[in-house]
């Protein structure tokens, strides 16, 4: 098995929204904001090559939305999804599976591209995976999340018959492949999926938006974007307790600097233990 961190660029989000109830006097030391209170965040995906399978986890924000839309998020950076895949020696046609942790635009925007004037799946040979509960949540969105669920990012996957559902268990994880399980969480949005990968006798967990960055390891650091913040708090505590006991590697999708970390429990609560690049796993 081979793992590659895929840089799909950078974007900006409001610092207060990203850190929730945590005061700016605290979070601004971690990820300083600009004059508009915006902080820079990564759009980091993960490529898993496992035998004949080339599995891409999340796809970044893409580039097909309007200039007005992107003006709110200021995408930037030297890399994008397809160029980063190319550096890993993989073409769009090579991807066999795309796991979309959830269908907010910054996680699935690159799943669909404007090709020859029409919206088409970016990875034409791939099966795209979500789950039925989250799919239904996304295509009939609530007012709070409506701006993040964009139909042009998701409906073409169904229309081109490339979409399949992972069955959500009543609790715990479900098996996706021999070396990957899926953990479902409910706090950020309904039925978000966190891939848990067995790699070199370790467990690497793609954190999506349960813990979007190393800054968010302490329990009170919960985004205002989370639909059910108290549920996130409970899910974080349960997960981090297990992560400490099992020495999990956390892979961060949005951390601007840190790809991976391990965690520890201190007298002040959960904290980062060590940070490192994926290549050091």
Image (cartoon, rainbow, N blue to C red):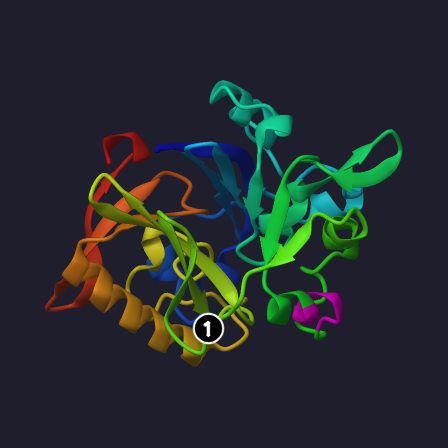
Q: Residue at x 49, y 33 (%)?
A: 7
Q: Is residue 78 left or right of residue 27?
A: right
Report the quarter where the N terminus lies: top left
- Eyeballing the image, is 218 above or below 249? below
Q: Is residue 128 left or right of residue 186?
A: right
Quadrant containing the C terminus is: top left
Looking at the image, can residue 3 be seen? yes
Point out residue 3 in the picture as x, y percentages from the top left corner: 37, 34
**In front here: 104 or 55?**
55
Query: Looking at the magenta stretch, what is its main secondary structure?
Result: helix
Mark 1 residue element: loop
Question: Can residue 73 be seen in this snapshot?
Answer: no
Q: Residue at x 30, y 34 (%)?
A: 277
Camera-nearest residue between 270 and 278:
278
What residue would you read off at disc 1?
Answer: 169
Residue 38 within the segment the image draws in magenta: no
Between 224 and 245, the one nearer to me in the picture? 245
Residues drawn in magenta: 136-141
Residue 176 percent across, percent down from the top left: 45, 54
In which quarter of the view is residue 137 placed?
bottom right
């Amino acid at each position: 098995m081979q793992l590659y961190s895929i840089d799909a660029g950078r974007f900006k989000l409001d610092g207060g929204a990203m850190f929730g109830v945590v005061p700016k006097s605290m979070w601004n030391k971690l990820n300083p904001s600009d004059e508009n209170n915006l902080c820079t965040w990564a759009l980091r995906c993960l490529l898993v090559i496992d035998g004949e399978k080339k599995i891409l986890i999340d796809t970044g924000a893409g580039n097909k939305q309007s200039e007005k839309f992107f003006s709110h998020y200021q995408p930037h950076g030297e890399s994008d999804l397809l160029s980063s895949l190319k550096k890993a020696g993989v073409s769009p046609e090579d991807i066999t599976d795309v796991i979309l942790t959830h269908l907010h635009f910054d996680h699935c925007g690159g799943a669909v591209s404007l090709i020859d004037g029409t919206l088409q799946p970016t990875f034409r040979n791939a099966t795209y995976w979500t789950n039925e509960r989250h799919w239904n949540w996304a295509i009939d969105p609530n007012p709070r999340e409506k701006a993040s669920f964009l139909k042009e990012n998701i409906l073409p996957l169904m229309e081109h018959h490339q979409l399949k559902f992972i069955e959500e268990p009543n609790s715990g994880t479900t098996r996706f492949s021999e070396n990957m399980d899926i953990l479902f969480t409910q706090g950020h949005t309904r039925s978000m999926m966190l891939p848990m990968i067995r790699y070199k006798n370790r467990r690497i967990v793609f954190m999506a938006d349960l813990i979007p960055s190393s800054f968010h390891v302490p329990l009170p650091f919960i985004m205002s974007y989370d639909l059910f913040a108290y549920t996130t708090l409970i899910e974080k505590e349960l997960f981090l307790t297990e992560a400490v006991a099992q020495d999990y590697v956390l892979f961060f999708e949005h951390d601007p600097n840190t790809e991976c970390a391990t965690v520890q429990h201190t007298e002040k609560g959960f904290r980062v233990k060590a940070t490192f690049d994926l290549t050091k796993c």
